[in-house]
Amino acid sequence: MNEFIDLRSDTVTLPTPAMRQAMYQAELGDDVFGEDPTVNRLEALAAEMMGQEAALFVVSGTMGNLVAILTHCQRGDEALMGDECHTFHYEVGGASALCGVPVRTVPNGSGLPALPAIEAAIRPDDMHMPPTRLLCLENTHNRCGGTAIGPGPFCAACDLAHRHGVVVHLDGARIFNAALAVGCDVRELVAPTDSVMFCLSKGLAAPVGSLLAGSADFIARARKNRKMVGGGMRQAGVLAAAGIVALTDMVDRLAEDHEHARLLAQGLADVPGVTIDPARVQTNIVIFEVADPLGFLDRLQAGGVLGIYFGGQRVRLVTHYGITRADVDAALAAVGRVMRGT
């Protein structure tokens, strides 16, 4: 796909030269026995960066969220999550199908569900009802345009859940984007949660992998659940080596993606037929509306630019490692040609 400017997702990033070299030279062992030194270093680094006691290397963000739900909940417990959240829309119903955990959704069109909606959805102690055990939050919020939730409102939601005896798991796939956008340390952002998952394979540009972090006891139990769902990867240091480079070299670079997204949004706002509010673009995700999104995307691809359909009249473009300012300008030119019909 190198002939295209690929703005479908930050998952299309390719590993950096430093990652490839680190993977080649990685010191290896059997991670299921806890003997892969590179995985151990990655997990320790991730725990320290999140301000948590321990962390667990998993294949993907979906696996990380699944393992978290398995670890926090018993079969028949209920999980609350936003009706726009990634776990509800894009993780194949794993909470219900594999964990035996029914899901109850609350509206979250702006990213974070309103506190009264969360409180109203928490079940009373009633023998006829599943107990509300878990609140799943997301930051940044993909389907809400990459919205970043700051520590104040995020902490308020976690405090509300905890007052009702409900634990909180954070799908922090792009948590470093969130921390950058709201201007705080990532540790502060995740501190009120009981567990957090974040991805290495999106803006941080590692080829594979995510981390699940929490207390030492939680991670010990999660490690067994990871094994149960097939996540024991043996000599996984080959992959973990790229993750270490991602965490040490690629976090600060995310500011470039945010700047490119702002420029993209501002340029789109000037194109007749495109509906977008540039002020809502906080991170690296740009969502806008056109009258015929599927036809628009076909014509855009013919012009050398890839985006993704996002439901209704919405199109999503995502900036990432490998996308330059020149690519942004070229993408805007292609959008202009499509909308003019030239």
Image (spheres, helix red, strand yellow):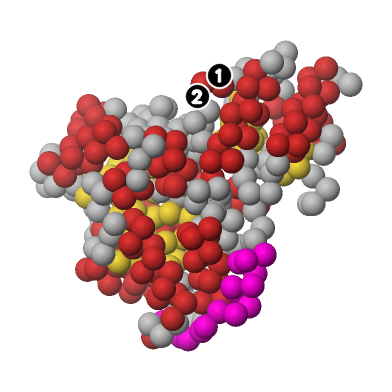
Q: Residue 63 sits in which quadrant?
A: bottom left
Check disc 1 and give the amino acid type.
Answer: Asp
258 and 129: which one is in front? Answer: 258
106 part of magenta stretch: no
Q: Residue at x 79, y 27 (%)?
A: 333
| Marks 2 and 1 in Cβ contact (< 8 Å) | yes
Question: Is residue 215 positioned above or below 125 on the image?
Answer: below
* Callout 1 secondary element: loop
Q: Quadrant of the C terminus?
A: top right
Q: Give the side of residue 48 with respect to residue 180, left or right.
A: left
Q: CA distance from mark 2 to mark 1?
A: 6 Å
* Callout 2 secondary element: helix
Q: Residue at x 51, y 77 (%)?
A: 237
Q: Residue 195 sits in which quadrant?
A: bottom left
Residue at the right extreme? 342
Q: Main secondary structure of the magenta part?
A: helix
Mark on residue 142?
Answer: none
Q: Give the side of residue 181 with respect to residue 184, left or right.
A: right
Q: Give the side of residue 79 with respect to residue 323, left or right.
A: left
Mark 2 neighbour class, 10 Å CA radius: few under 14, some 14 to 19, many 20 or more: some
Task: Give the residue at mark 1.
Answer: 277
171 and 88: which one is in front? Answer: 171
- Is residue 99 in sight in this rendering? no
| Span highlighted in magenta in the image | 17-32
Q: Residue at x 53, y 28 (%)?
A: 281
Check disc 2 and give the amino acid type.
Answer: Arg
Where residue 107 sits in the image (x, y, percent)?
36, 29
Q: Give the side of residue 54 with respect to residue 307, left or right.
A: left
